[in-house]
Amino acid sequence: SYERLSPSILSNFYIHNIRIYDDSGNQLLSISKTRVTYSIINLLKKDLQKGISSLIIDGITLDVDELVLLSSKFTSGSDSKMNLAEVKKIIPENIKLKNIYLEYDDKNVSALLNIKNIGVSNTLKKNTIDVQADAVLTATLAAYKKHLSGKLAVSGSVTDKFDGSQINLKLRDFTDG
């Protein structure tokens, strides 16, 4: 469901307050605001990569427990191979996700990962998809009576066959107080 759609017919539209529920009525995902920038001409030509030039998703709240439960229903034993060149043709050139909240809670661990930004650059001229992200983690480990917090930054490039791909992970300001 969504609360409001704000179109600008020629170039972009916004969708506000998207909510996704499972069959039992449990909310899996909420998104405050999404903006899609597009070209009608390129979409009519069936060129999705140029047709949707950017996608910005802001304010995502996701219940990880519910997502894991739902995804377990869809696991399959098929050995399909991912072809990055084909994937690159159907995703926008620029994707930005902002303010994502991933929550996990059980009797031993309570955690919140607040992903401030994820940027994906998908230029057809390159044979890679470049990714960068910044996040803040807070967690409580009940068994050890510890509260952890810190910042993470991830950046890298993914190649077609993953050979030559690189991912850099930076951890900083972690405390156990």
Image (cartoon, rainbow, N blue to C red):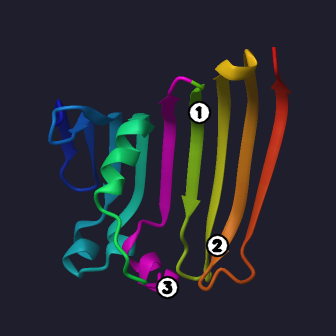
**CA neighbours of label 1 inside 10 A, class few (<14), some (14 to 19), many (20+):** some
Residue 173 is tagged as none
**CA neighbours of label 2 inside 10 A, class few (<14), some (14 to 19), many (20+):** some
Q: Secondary structure at mark 2?
A: strand
User: Is residue 10 left or right of 132 when viewed as pictured?
Assistant: left
Q: Which residue is mark 1?
A: 113
Identified at 31% across, 79% down, the residue is 47
Which mark sits nearer the N-terminus, 3 or 1? Answer: 3
Q: Which residue is mark 2?
A: 158
Q: Amino acid at mark 1?
A: Leu
| Mark-to-mark CA distance, 2 and 3 | 11 Å
Residue 85 is tagged as 3
- Start-end of magenta stretch: 80-107
Q: Secondary structure at mark 3?
A: helix
| Mark-to-mark CA distance, 2 and 1 | 23 Å
Vertical placement of 42 versus 53: above or below?
below
Identified at 25% across, 39% down, the residue is 15
- Quadrant of the image occupied by residue 28: top left
Q: Amino acid at mark 2?
A: Val
Vertical placement of 138 versus 79: above or below?
above
Magenta region includes residue 75: no
